[in-house]
Amino acid sequence: GESVGLHLPTLSVQEGDNSIINCAYSNSASDYFIWYKQESGKGPQFIIDIRSNMDKRQGQRVTVLLNKTVKHLSLQIAATQPGDSAVYFCAEKAGGSYIPTFGRGTSLIVHP
Amino acid sequence: DGGITQSPKYLFRKEGQNVTLSCEQNLNHDAMYWYRQDPGQGLRLIYYSQIVNDFQKGDIAEGYSVSREKKESFPLTVTSAQKNPTAFYLCASSIYEGVYYTFGSGTRLTVV
């Protein structure tokens, strides 16, 4: 069935490094993608989004890249800080539906 | 400040008992959602409501019930029919057909 998945369940980086979290999706009808950050014991928080008519979008220290050809998106975090340690979810939404499908999540661990 | 509040943060239930989780929002959002999160898994949709006095089953509605008598409130009852209720429950809200979810901080339910 259609699903959103992640390549790596856990990513460990050193403070100051750049982090890249990957996400694969299989629904070619998906036209909107969202990244969420979930800190331990808390609810997910919106980080950044991208529509299918774009291939790159930048925020503060974060960049989302979308490759529709291979159905892949990534979240890049520049100069990773200990406060970035969290689980990161990607979510996709297909046109005609407003219920997104969430991926399993990647745990980012930042070592000081 | 506008937001979405879940209570209690931790909840313990004896087997065979029903328990109700509270979710209140003051964002004037039309739609509200309940998700279940288990370790290492993504968010699974239990129920959602687009408007007052109307709600729809999600992917894992069995053993759960909801009501939407007020726009601000969307309580979830975990019934004794739910075979494996121990989990982290997240409530979210959005504008109608919106994809910008605001999540609550979650309720961790443990069956003892």
Image: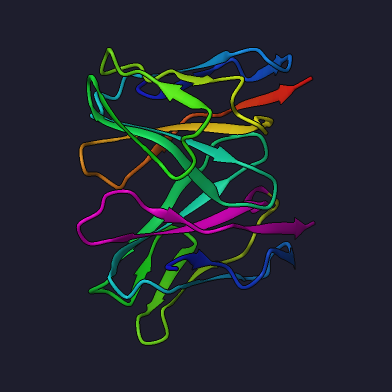
Which stretch is magenta? A83-112
Is B93 left, or right, of A78 in this rendering? left
Q: Is residue B111 magenta?
A: no
**Which sits in the foreground, A55 or B69?**
B69
Question: Residue B54: x and y, percent?
Answer: 24, 25
* Screen quadrant of the N terminus of chain A: bottom left
Q: Is residue B41 above or below residue A67?
A: above
Question: Residue B63: x and y, percent?
Answer: 53, 28
**Which sits in the foreground, A19 or A7?**
A7
**Residue placed farthest to the bottom in the image?**
A69
Q: Is residue A103 magenta?
A: yes
**Residue placed farthest to the front in the image?**
B81
Q: Residue at the spot x=42%, y=55% of the render? A: A101
Is B4 left, or right, of B39 in this rendering? left
Is A65 left, or right, of A20 in this rendering? left
Is A79 left, or right, of A67 in this rendering? right
Q: Is residue A96 above or below residue B105?
A: below
* Quadrant hosting residue A21: bottom right
Q: Residue at the spot x=50%, y=34% of the render? A: B62
Q: Residue at the spot x=38%, y=66% of the render? A: A58
Figure colour scheme:
rainbow
Number of callouts in the render? 0
Question: Residue A23: x and y, percent?
Answer: 52, 70
Q: Is residue A59 above or below residue B34?
A: below
Question: Residue A31: x and y, percent?
Answer: 27, 67
Q: Residue at the spot x=56%, y=29% of the render? A: B106
**Which sits in the foreground, A94 or B13?**
B13
**Which sits in the foreground, B67 or B107?**
B67
* Screen quadrant of the C terminus of chain A: bottom right
